[in-house]
Amino acid sequence: MKNKTRLLVCFFILIGFGISINAQDLLETLENEYPDTPQYEFATFKASRISIGHSIETRKKGVLEIQAFNRFWNIPNYRAQSFVADKLSARLALEYGISDRLTFGAGGSTLDGIFDGFLKYKLIQQRSDGKGSPLSITLFQNGSYRSKRNQPFPDVNRFDEFSDKLAFTSQLLIARKFTPQFSVQVSPTYIHRSSSVFGEDPNNQFAIGLGGRYKLGGHVSVVSEYYYVINPLKSIDTYDAFSLGVNWELSDVMLQFQLTNTRAMVEDAFITQTPNNFNFKDGNFVFGFNAIFVLHLSQKKP
Amino acid sequence: MNKIIILLFMLTGFTDVEVKSDQIITRQGQTSFFSYTSVENIEAKNNQVLSIIDLSKHKIAVSMLMNAFVFKKSLMHEHFNESYIESDLYPKATFEGDIIDFDPLAPGTQIKIIKGDLTIHGITKEVEIKTTIENNNGNYLLTGDFEVAVKDFDIKIPPILAPNIAKTISITFRFEYQPYEK
């Protein structure tokens, strides 16, 4: 009899269990029904540039960006009638997403006459579900052609043959989105210049870029970028590129404003050949403004 | 005594069977939302909505990932997740409620009110949704539409973009259920 009461108790406990399992919250049940698909971080940065240099972001497939990058500055002790700024350089460019991971871009700069083209490939994406890679990695490779001498600054490359005017930049862009607001990028950079006027200048240069973004709201973020050159040019004085800026994203338009010391907008030129330091004196201080318009050439059917 | 034990066995067995057939689930529910303004039409569709109904208790729950919404333009998807719905912080939208006066056994179509809590962007609001329930020999299909006000869920829209996004968003859903087996 005692055994039987025990059995009975056991049964009641079992039934109790059954009920408690069934009484589980419906939402909790659904929580366990989610398929285990990987979740990736998106929008570590918004635009293809953090401020002056490339970010890890590539464009989605079928997206065409029309870009106008502008830099304005004053010439010291220059008596001119120009409005706001004495000098303006603009880089007009197109960027197109061949696939979700691969982006092609090409552009031309007005003042220094540099034409450039690049490919950017998103190698690894940071996972937001705690599994997989904690970092995003993008490969960047560009080639640039200098069609004009760099007046009034001395030229570091020869202008005799076509191949003398080429330079190539390879970057490994490594970024992490720490919080929804805060992202950091480290960019080891290798720059090869095809020719040198002065024998003392290195043809292969190395640099490390450091960039960050902090989002102030849904659409506005503060960004900063710095490129440290490990073996700078010896024939002329060069300074490291620095930028402090604000990015503003609105619908199909992205605007990037920056305070910087760089005038050029192509990697090899602004990383290794920035002739002035960052301060607010005429001639050194450059105001930059990037306008990007996004067109979706192939649209998905929702 | 033995008979009682057998009876208990049968009871537990029965309840188990009943519980199994009592819950129905969908893993490919469809939810779409639309924002129509004179400037821009925005629509998005999510084909991976989860929903479960407890037929005996007349209870329903819905859960979906916000980043599973597909937009016409990839930039809209990014803006929706990053700037508006903030899916980093609030990855899911959920609904939990009661189907009022629901008769699971009645065949054919019945139109019922579902009353419950809708949570979007971390904010919960009580809503009532008129729903069409079709019962085809135990295969249930729920369809319906309702509207939500953007400002109810604390979604910030910059003034310059206010004309592009409707004040109320219309939402449609279509859930086809199957028996739920654990």
Image (cartoon, coloured by chain):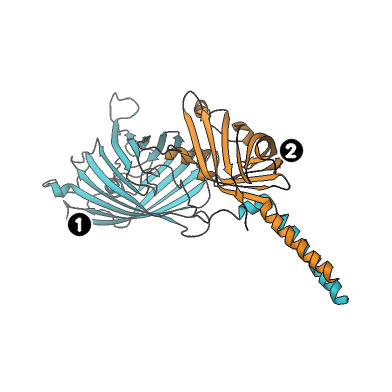
SS at mark 2 in the image = loop
What is the number of callouts on the image?
2
Q: CA distance from mark 1 to mark 2?
A: 88 Å
**Is residue B138 at least partly visible in the picture?**
yes
Residue B97 vs residue B28, the one in the foreground: B28
Give x and y (percent) for residue A25. 70, 52
- Rendered orange, the chain in question is B
Name the side, left or right, on which B168 lies relative to A150: right
- Image quarter where the N terminus of chain A lies is bottom right
Name the side, left or right, on which A292 lies relative to B54: left
Q: Identify the disc placed on residue A200.
A: 1
Residue at numbered disc 2: B101
Image mark 2: chain: B
As drawn, the residue found furthest toward the left would be A160
Image mark 1: chain: A
Q: Residue at x 41, y 35 (%)?
A: A255
- Rendered cyan, the chain in question is A
Residue A48 vs residue A11, the one in the foreground: A11
Q: Residue at x 35, y 40 (%)?
A: A62
The amino acid type of the residue labelled 2 equals Asp
Q: Identify the disc placed on residue B1.
A: none
Give x and y (percent) for residue B50. 58, 48
Give x and y (percent) for residue B64. 57, 46
The amino acid type of the residue labelled 1 equals Glu
Q: Eyeballing the image, is A34 above or below A295? A: below
Residue A85 vs residue A36, the one in the foreground: A36
Mark 1 surroundings within 10 Å by alpha-carbon count, few (fewer than 14), some (14 through 19), many (20 or more): few
Give x and y (percent) for residue A220. 49, 38
